[in-house]
Amino acid sequence: MNAPTAPHHAAHTDDWRIDRDRAVALFGPAAHHWPVEIVEETGSTNADLMARMKALPRRASALPRPIVRVAYLQTAGRGRRGRAWYAEPGNALLFSVACVLPRPLENLAGLSLAVGVALVDGLRSLPLTAPGQIALKWPNDVLLEGDKLAGILIETAWSTASASAVVIGIGTNVKGGEQLAAKVSAFNSGERTPGTTPTTLSRALPSANLTDTLAAELNALEAALQRFGQAGFAPFQPRWNACHAYAGREVVLLEQGIEVARGVAAGVDARGQLLLDTATGRETIATGDVSLRLATDGGAP
């Protein structure tokens, strides 16, 4: 999809809410057709859309176009492995996209990585001071200058031999970096772990706002979901590897805080599995209940 032609600038500085008219003006042609719901507060946009998707007929034509649900505040929002997502209203863009992909469950491998590629491309379309500093961390995080900018959580409502109904939850820290850092620092007893410490888009774009961020991300997602539905993750593999934050660096994989693997990150394969060059050869790591960290001289961080 072509990038928005309207200029990017801050929305009204005295109103942190999404400017729907401006967002629509920034949407590319296809994103115009997506229903976008905006609510003040909900438990979880993922849960809201999951309930709706489970009620649909189980066929590929059950949902003509993706549905987007945005909430300024999620009281039960969560990230991967059930972690809470810290966000103050107006500071984070929290939304979910529900869609039916013409692929069975076993052919959804790499979907979260494809979404990550779309987010990088969408965010890099904004007038950032250093677009190249936005990168990807396996399996589903977007980093800015090495810190966590956005996270992705994908859930499957149902799947058949020809289609799967999925809900893609996305949380992007847009502004309010000082408040966010203070809250997370207190929760983590002041410890800072690269790749998990949160940062905000305003670090690279002082005028960052929810409206422009939403338009940029949805424009990129529309094309990405179409492409993934047709061909899976394979077309995204080169782009993901080109945006890989830890390419060629030593990393450790942790499971419940215990190191289970260590090696040099060598990118991902055509299914989105992590390629790890270890002392005993190359290993392929499937997405599971593991955390990826940069290695340190003293062992696992």
Image (spheres, rainbow, N blue to C red):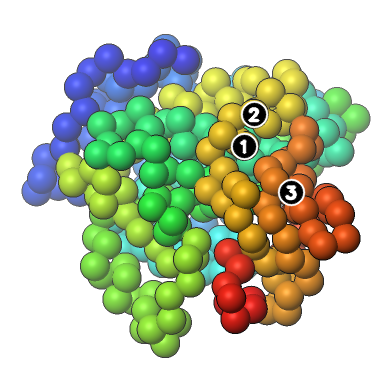
Question: Between marks 3 and 1, how big is the CA–CA gap?
Answer: 10 Å
The answer to whether mark 1 and mark 2 are in CB contact below 8 A is: yes
Q: Amino acid at mark 2?
A: Pro
Neighbor class of circle 2 (other Cα within 10 Å; few <14, some 14-19, many 20+) is some
Q: Which quadrant holds residue 111? A: top right
Checking the image for residue 238, the label placed there is 2
Residue at image x 32%, y 18%?
A: 4
Neighbor class of circle 3 (other Cα within 10 Å; few <14, some 14-19, many 20+) is some
Which one is earlier in the sequence, the residue at label 3 or at label 2? 2
Location of residue 261 with respect to 51 vertically, above or below? below
Residue at image x 83%, y 38%?
A: 105
Question: Between marks 3 and 2, how big is the CA–CA gap?
Answer: 13 Å
Q: Nearer the viewer, residue 96 or 174?
A: 174
Residue to which mark 1 is pinned? 241
Q: Is residue 179 left or right of residue 39?
A: left
Neighbor class of circle 1 (other Cα within 10 Å; few <14, some 14-19, many 20+) is some
Which one is earlier in the sequence, the residue at label 3 or at label 1? 1
Q: Amino acid at mark 3?
A: Leu
Percent from the top left, x then y, of residue 146? 44, 56
Q: Is residue 194 left or right of residue 79?
A: left
Q: Nearer the viewer, residue 294 or 86?
A: 294
> Please, what secondary structure does the residue beneath circle 3 have?
strand
Question: Between marks 1 and 2, how big is the CA–CA gap?
Answer: 5 Å
Asked if one can make out residue 45 in the rendered structure from this viewpoint, the answer is no
Percent from the top left, x then y, of residue 10? 16, 37
> Please, what secondary structure does the residue beneath circle 1 have?
helix
Residue to which mark 3 is pinned? 274
